[in-house]
Image (cartoon, rainbow, N blue to C red):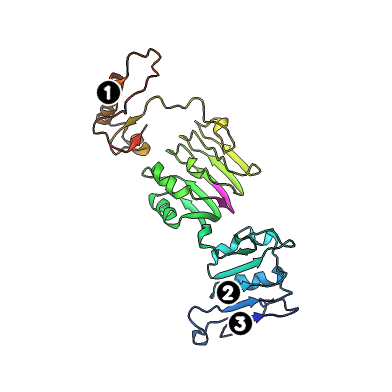
């Protein structure tokens, strides 16, 4: 036990392998300032990742730990690409990039510095299961660029709009785990995940309304499984190149306060159907008749009480 902070600076040959014996570190706040780290490792010429990892994972949960400016320290891809460090906000880990150590597996904050500290580089969030409006709103608030774990989109509630999916998922670039999209009756598209570049695997199954699951930025070496999506054609699967041929927009209507989800909910209501047909009639009457190919420019279409929210 060390009640105050531990500082390991400018040593030659010390490996900082403190995991086996040291159990408590820096917990007496009277021995350090409120913002001071409980551990600083700097300037050590023999520091290796093997000797350091267990120590960091144990003590970064107890307080701020700083590892910086250790000559020759160069982690390998397998040490950091799982982004375990993202779950330890109190860990400040950095190393210098050079010709001998050119790969950065944290955030590349400058041409010569690789670090966990980069406020402008995006936010890392833990794995997520998204089902409800509340789940998606939390993703919006967190603005997750990286997900350290899997992202599961399952059984989305009917009140989850396309706009909310866009705001919650469009920032996501990388997952360390799997992308699983399953059992979503009203989900039509994965366009909100168009910027996703990395995932361990992608599973898309049992989404009866899905017509476009393309993920254009996804690494082509990613394992993909697609099954039981009734309306999804091969060209619109994650590595596909085009939407399904049997899916097209024949007319765009503008109805006040109606998005895709509400349209599906209200289509069984007689009065709502009457409003839709009334809008179609207005559209037909407003089409310029001089063009027999029906390709003329049409004025904006409005239904009864038209507003700014679009549905199709």
* Element under disc 1: helix
Q: Residue at x 42, y 53 (%)?
A: 140
Is residue 174 in the magenta section? yes
User: Residue 248: where, in percent of width, then height?
Assistant: 45, 26
Is 190 located above or below residue 45 in the figure? above
Choose the circle earlier in sequence order: 3 or 2.
3
Identify the residue under disc 3: 6
Query: Could you say which disc has been placed on residue 282 in the image?
Result: 1
Q: Is residue 271 left or right of residue 212?
A: left
Q: Residue at x 51, y 38 (%)?
A: 206
Q: Which residue is mark 2?
A: 65
Q: CA–CA distance between discs 1 and 3?
A: 76 Å
Q: Is residue 125 visible?
A: no
The magenta region covers 173-179
Q: Position of residue 198 (x, y in %)?
A: 60, 48
* 164 left or right of 74 in image: left
What distance separates the C-alpha of mark 3 from that of mark 2?
10 Å
- Residue 293, percent from left and from top: 40, 14
**Separation of marks 2 and 1 at Cα, in angstroms:** 67 Å
Mark 2 neighbour density, 10 Å: few (under 14) some (14–19) many (20 or more)? many
Quarter placement of the C terminus:
top left
Residues under numbered marks 2 and 1 in contact, where contact means CB atoms less than 8 Å apart? no
Picture coordinates of residue 270 (x, y %)? 26, 29
Residue in the image at 56% along x and 85% along y: 4
Q: Quadrant of residue 290?
A: top left
| Quadrant housing the N terminus | bottom right
Between 281 and 117, the one lying in front of the other is 117
First of labels 2, 1 by sequence position: 2
């Amino acid at each position: 036990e060390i009640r105050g902070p531990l500082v390991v600076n400018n040593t030659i040959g010390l490996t900082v392998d403190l995991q086996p014996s040291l159990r408590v570190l820096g917990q007496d706040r009277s021995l350090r300032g409120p913002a001071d780290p409980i551990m600083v490792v700097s300037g050590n010429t023999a520091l290796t990742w093997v000797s350091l990892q267990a120590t960091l994972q144990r003590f970064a949960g107890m307080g701020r730990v700083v590892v910086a400016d250790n000559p020759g320290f160069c982690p390998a891809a397998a040490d950091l690409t799982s982004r375990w460090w993202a779950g330890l906000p109190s860990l400040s880990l950095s190393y210098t990039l050079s010709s001998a150590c050119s790969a950065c597996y944290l955030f590349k904050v400058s041409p010569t510095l690789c670090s966990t500290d980069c406020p402008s580089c995006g936010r890392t969030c833990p794995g997520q299961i998204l089902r409800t409006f509340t789940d998606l709103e939390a993703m919006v608030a967190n603005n997750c660029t990286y997900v350290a774990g899997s992202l599961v989109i399952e059984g989305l509630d009917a009140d989850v709009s396309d706009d909310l999916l866009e705001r919650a998922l469009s920032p996501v670039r990388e997952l360390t785990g799997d992308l699983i999209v399953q059992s979503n009756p009203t989900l039509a598209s994965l366009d909100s995940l168009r910027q996703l570049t990395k995932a361990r695997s992608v599973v898309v199954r049992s989404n009866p309304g899905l017509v476009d699951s393309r993920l254009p930025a996804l690494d082509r070496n990613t394992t993909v499984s697609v099954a039981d999506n009734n309306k999804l054609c091969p060209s619109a699967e994650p590595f596909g190149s085009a939407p399904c041929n049997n899916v097209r927009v024949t007319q765009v209507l503008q109805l006040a306060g109606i998005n895709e989800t509400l349209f599906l909910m209200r289509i069984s209501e007689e009065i709502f159907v009457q409003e839709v047909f009334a809008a179609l009639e207005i559209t037909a009457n407003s089409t310029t008749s001089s063009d027999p190919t029906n390709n003329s420019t049409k004025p904006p279409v409005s239904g009864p009480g038209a507003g700014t929210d679009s549905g199709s």
